[in-house]
Image (cartoon, rainbow, N blue to C red):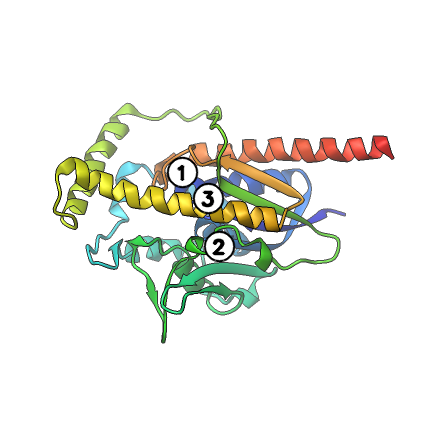
Amino acid sequence: MKQKVALVLSGGGARGIAHIGAIEELEKNGFQISSIAGTSMGAVVGGVYASGKLEAYKEWLYTLDKMKLFNLLDFSFTTEGLVKGDKLFHKMKEFISDQNIEDFGMPYAAVAADIINKKEVIFTEGNVFNAIRASVAIPTVLTPVKTADGLLVDGGVINNIPIEYITRTPGDILIAVNVNADIPYIKPVIQKTEIVAEQSVYQKRLKDFYHHLQKLNPLSNEEKIGYFNLINKTISLMMFHIAKVSIEQHPPDILIEVSADCCGAFDFYRAEEMVETGRAAAIQSLEKYNEGGIRKLAQG
């Protein structure tokens, strides 16, 4: 019988793609995911997995070169967020069907933050697409989700690795994947080689992106770019410490850690590298876990 796993996936933007590699490695080693909870990108990957479309989602991510990525961004340039996300989430509906969470074959939870009522919002039932859209609404980047009496943003501002909201079942073990770990990044060996021409095109589009950002901040060019980076680095630092506290308070049986330096929050074009990064991290953690079990048997 396969070992059941209660799996918790952290937020982390494009770094969250590493969750795919971790999940694949867990299944390869005979683990059965019996429940799943996630924040932001962790909620996305968890929802896609629960929908049974993880492989298709991964293959689509692999096609996201730099041009395709920018074509999915519909800039809003409002005070609520730079990107509406309509185009991106319309595409995501191919992988997250318009179904209710309770129709999944396993318990699932997605975390968002209500900044009006100053509280966590935990989605364990209702429309999964709406739950994920709220969970990934990165402040200042993706426009928030309005409710009858609140305003929902990325759950990572309150709880970036929601261990306490995972549903446990008899005989399972708790595994958490944190893609914001303060550890060195060792780039995995991958077969696919980046194309230099694509990189140059991406850099041009990235400059265009920053040019749009400048409209929101009447400072010098250097300061404007720094302003955007400052916001994201501040959010990342906050999420890192929140995750650290959560792990200390609710230590998992297995902790899979991916370096926060592995890629930028918006580097979705590095999907293949991130999947392999997650796989390598899972292999390392499972080896430690198995070694610990062998030592306990030897001592017994």
Q: Position of residue 17 (x, y in %)?
A: 45, 42
Q: How far is mark 2 from mark 1, CA to CA?
A: 29 Å
The residue that disc 1 covers is 62
Determine the residue located farthest toward the right in the rendered image.
300
| 115, above or below 248, in the image | below
Q: Amino acid at mark 2?
A: Asn
Q: Residue shown at 73%/30% (left/top)?
A: 291
Q: Position of residue 85 (x, y in %)?
A: 30, 55
The residue that disc 2 covers is 159
User: Which disc number belongs to residue 240?
Assistant: 3
| SS at circle 2 | loop
Observer-nearest residue: 20 or 250? Answer: 250
Q: Residue shown at 52%/50% (left/top)?
A: 161
Q: Amino acid at mark 1?
A: Tyr
Observer-nearest residue: 250 or 256? Answer: 250
Depth check, mark 2 against mark 1: the one in front is: 2
